[in-house]
Image (cartoon, grey):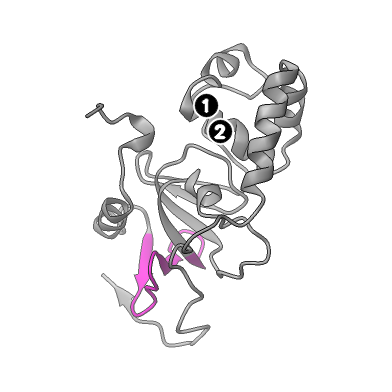
């Protein structure tokens, strides 16, 4: 059995348990009675914003589970993930960094997309997921990076993006809208 790497370290169940354990440190409160499958409603204490979050092992799973598909009204407007290895168009809480990332923001561990260090990292699974996510979000720096690559690489990446823009086959990830809606009396899990 191969040794787990940085991008496979977390499982969805472990992320949810860790999220509940560190909720006070993360300045987040979970709203009672709002768990539907792998989605939960939460309240950010630093911004007083109420979010419907999906729990994922990696932020790149947003595309793997077709949560970016526009016709699927899943109601999730945030991601809580073990590691932020992509770029998604919703706020993302990465538990390995204990940090919130804004919409269309990526980790800067490899530097900007147009840097030489990112070009080397792009050939790893982690870097590839970051580039694909940036392209899926329509970031201009990622589009320029794609145009500077070999033609065969461009075709392969564009084919992968076409697949990610469609709804994946099989049973969907169990997520859903907030069962409580916008009720004024909210119970908070401590």
Quadrant in which the N terminus is drawn = top left
The residue to which callout 2 is attached is 130
Answer whether residue 17 is visible to the viewer in this image. Answer: yes
- Residue 127, disc: 1
Where in the figure is residue 161, as x and y percent of width and height?
66, 40
150 to 12, vertically: above or below: above
Where in the figure is residue 37, as x and y percent of width and height?
38, 69
Point 64% across, 58% down: residue: 69
| Rendering quarter of residue 188 | bottom left
Residue nearest the viewer, comparing 152 with 8: 152
The magenta span reads: 28-52
- Residue 163, disc: none
Q: Is residue 89 left or right of residue 23?
A: right
Point 52% across, 19% down: residue: 121
Quadrant in which the C terminus is drawn = bottom left
Where in the figure is residue 149, as x and y percent of width and height?
71, 17
Say how many tags the image has.
Answer: 2
Point 67% across, 66% down: residue: 71
Q: Is residue 106 left or right of residue 173?
A: right
Q: CA distance from mark 2 to mark 1?
A: 5 Å
């Amino acid at each position: 059995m191969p040794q787990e790497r940085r991008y496979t370290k977390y499982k969805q169940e472990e992320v949810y348990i860790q999220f509940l354990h560190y909720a006070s440190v993360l300045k987040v409160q979970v709203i009672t009675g709002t768990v539907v499958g792998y989605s939960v409603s939460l309240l950010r204490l630093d911004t007083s914003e109420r979010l419907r979050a999906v729990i994922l092992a990696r932020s790149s799973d947003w595309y793997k589970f077709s949560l970016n598909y526009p016709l699927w009204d899943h109601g999730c407007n945030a991601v809580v993930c073990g590691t932020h290895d992509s770029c998604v168009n919703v706020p993302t809480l990465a538990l390995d960094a204990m940090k919130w990332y804004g919409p269309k923001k990526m980790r800067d561990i490899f530097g900007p997309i147009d840097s030489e260090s990112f070009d080397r990292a792009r050939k790893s699974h982690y870097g590839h997921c970051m580039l694909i996510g940036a392209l899926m979000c329509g970031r201009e720096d990622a589009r320029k990076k794609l145009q500077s690559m070999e033609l065969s690489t461009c075709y392969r990446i564009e084919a992968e993006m076409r697949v990610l823009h469609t709804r994946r086959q099989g049973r969907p990830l169990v997520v859903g809208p907030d069962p409580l809606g916008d009720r004024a009396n909210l119970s908070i899990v401590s």
